[in-house]
Amino acid sequence: MLEVLNLTKKYRNTLANDNLNFQVNAGEIAVLIGPNGAGKSTAIKCIAGLLRFNGNIAVCGYPNKSVEAKRNFGYIPELPAPIETLTVYEHMEFIARAYKVEDWKDKAKNLLERMELDDMRKKLGKELSKGMQQKLSICCALLPEPKVILMDEPLIGLDPHAIKELKTMLTELRAKGCTILVSTHMLDSVREFWDKALIMMNGKIAAVRTRAEIESTGEDLEQLFFSITEGAQTGGAAK
Amino acid sequence: MRAILYLVRKEIKNAVVDLFHHPARLILYLFLAAMLGLSLLNGTERQVRAPGSYLDIRILHGVYLGILLFITVPSVLSGLKSGATFFKMSDVNFLFVSPISPKKILAYGLIKQMASDIFMMIFLLFYAGMTINLFGVALWQVVALVGGIALMVFTIQLITLLVYSFSSGHPERVGWIKTVLYGVIAMMTAFALSSFWFHGANQESLFAAIASPYLEYVPVVGWMKGMVFAVMNEDAARTGIFAALNAAAVAGSILLFVRSDSDYYEDVLQTTETTFELKQSAKNGKPIRTRGLNNKPVRVTDTGILHGWGASVFFFKHIREMKRRNRVPFIRTSSIVLVAVNVLVVVVLQKLTAADGDGMPGGMLLAISLAMSSYILFFFNAAGDWTLELMKPYIYLVPAKPFAKLFWASLSTLLAPVIDGVVIFTVLCLLLRANPATALICMLIYASMGFIYTAGNILSQRIFGQMVNKGMIMFVYMLMLGVLLLPGVGISVALYIAFKDIPAILLGLPIFISNVLVSVGIFAACRNVLSSAEMNS
């Protein structure tokens, strides 16, 4: 489970995240949606422990920067950063050794096959295309079988097969009880699988809706999104 | 033209306003300006000493020519491969597609580049005090020297652009240009060696060769050196001749470039895009492809990290990466270059001093090598595995204690100078038949310099985090290193003053012990740096 309490992140004079509060439960896929510059990536990076922040973030009950929390979450960055001089397979070995994953070889093989990277095992990080780098990044994040998964724009740069496979993986992970937080500005890409939508605007969470709420009230997520994002730009406010 | 003037005006205004929005940066600039002022004032207020107490001015001739060649040759060679640019991606996106004449845009680019080159060269004035003190030159002469370097940087960028435009897509032209370039260098080297041939291999011949007026007729590099030294000697005729030659080089390059291919956009586009991508990569914390490894294909033979569990895997990952870069871990190309440079310097110094008398003692030559290698190590260390690791997310994400990650991720950076030191000083000790104890203390001090550089880097990470302006950090980092080195150096100097005949090993030991203790102290104090650090984003 992921719990974010009063998360505030300030860059000099810019308030990137302003007192964010939300929770994502086990077996739930939450999507953090918002226009460019809303503060989604900053929030994800704070949760992943890559940025300093004010507030409290707990991963499976542990402070997010603790070793226990790190053992429990996987992070797929917006910009994949493979290690130039390691092969694809060595990336998996590196993660397995760093995260102390026992019997990792079969898991790695399965992940690489699903992402169609198995015939690239001997390719170096620097030789991969941007899409392949992203696929490798996904494999690395999922190898330790994390309980909480953070994804920052995970579908960008992926080919149709990888997008389909990743969506299937996400629903499988949800079924296994994983907590998943996906940040994106592309509503269409997450339409089929989200359980909770957190709409961000100007560094704040402007609205939270569950799929059940949307379905019961007949509200349209896309309409709500635009009423918040475009309404705010023209001076309107969302409830 | 109005649009360009508007752009320039706004760029200047916004840069100034932005400076006031970042008071820390403003204070640092003011601090640097004050330091520069002090350095210049210090240089001008020094009492003029007797002529014999300064270094031979011909050394300055040689060093200056060397600097100009160092700026020129790599730039032209890179121009043959990838061209040059003085445009930014925003210029490409907004100006290149606008209905403004390409020639005006080129002029805008040139002026902007020139301003930026002059601004960058201001930092060279920090060496003014040292130059005045060593060679007994006046401040205005140092300004002329620095101005010459700025003009050279500007001119060579133009020539690089022209070279790329002329050779792009014509491999045979690349061959001609390389032949001419190497031919000129070979002729200059042959000229210097001929001086040894005719006048004997001694210091006098070397100085006469490097300061020879004939070298001033070598195109561009020689002309620039000739102009600067003519200005310094207040020789109006030679100043005029060389200024005219340089102006012809600049004007000719612009003219040829504009006339040869009016569509220069394509020539600069690729380099502008590459530069933009590199900057973006650096900003986004992505590894920069050209850093640490060239883009030559690497043959993957044996694979696997094979060792390490938890934090220790970072060290074994570095070993695997080293093997892939250089086959033998820790023996890098830079190590071989460092050994070669040291051997060369020691041999030249030995020959020069032997010609003038008894020759320099082996211990002294080892000490000179130690000082030079430690200075070079500073730059190698800045690009160590530890620094590169901070740019990737894994170091922050791996579930291990921050201190364990800090130790294992910096271990390869700590060990590299130990191995380099052993190789360098063993070779030099054998070559000079020097006292093994002196070589041993040199190895220990060199290794401890590596420790203190890495520790200083960690401390700077702890204090400044991943600040964007690396140039500024570098300056403060150097000051900080000075403070960290102070205890050991202070004790050694005190020992030397108290006991003049003290053996080198005892003289060097305090520096080694102090460096190790200070480094251990910094590691202990910054053990949690990774839990408070921010990835560059």
Image: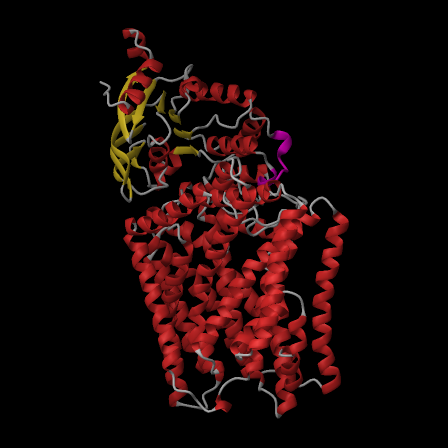
Q: Is residue A126 magenta?
A: yes
Rendering coords of residue B271 (x, y %) = 58, 45
B402 and B487: which is toward the camera: B487
Rendering coords of residue B164 (x, y %) = 65, 49
Rendering coords of residue A196 (x, y %) = 33, 19
Residue B364, placed above or below residue A104: below
Which quadrant: the N terminus of chain A? top left
B95 and B31: which is toward the camera: B95
B153 and A127: which is toward the camera: B153
Give the overall secondary structure of the magenta segment. Answer: helix
Residue A13, placed above or below residue B116: above
Which quadrant: the C terminus of chain A? top left
Does residue B31 appear in the picture of this structure? yes
Q: Is residue B106 magenta?
A: no
B336 and B309: which is toward the camera: B336
Residue at image coords 41%, 52%? B406
Residue at image coords 66%, 74%? B215
Does residue B339 appear in the picture of this structure? no
Which colour assignment does the render follow? secondary structure
Where does the magenta region start and end? A118-127
Rendering coords of residue B501 (x, y %) = 46, 91
Q: Quadrant of residue A171?
A: top left
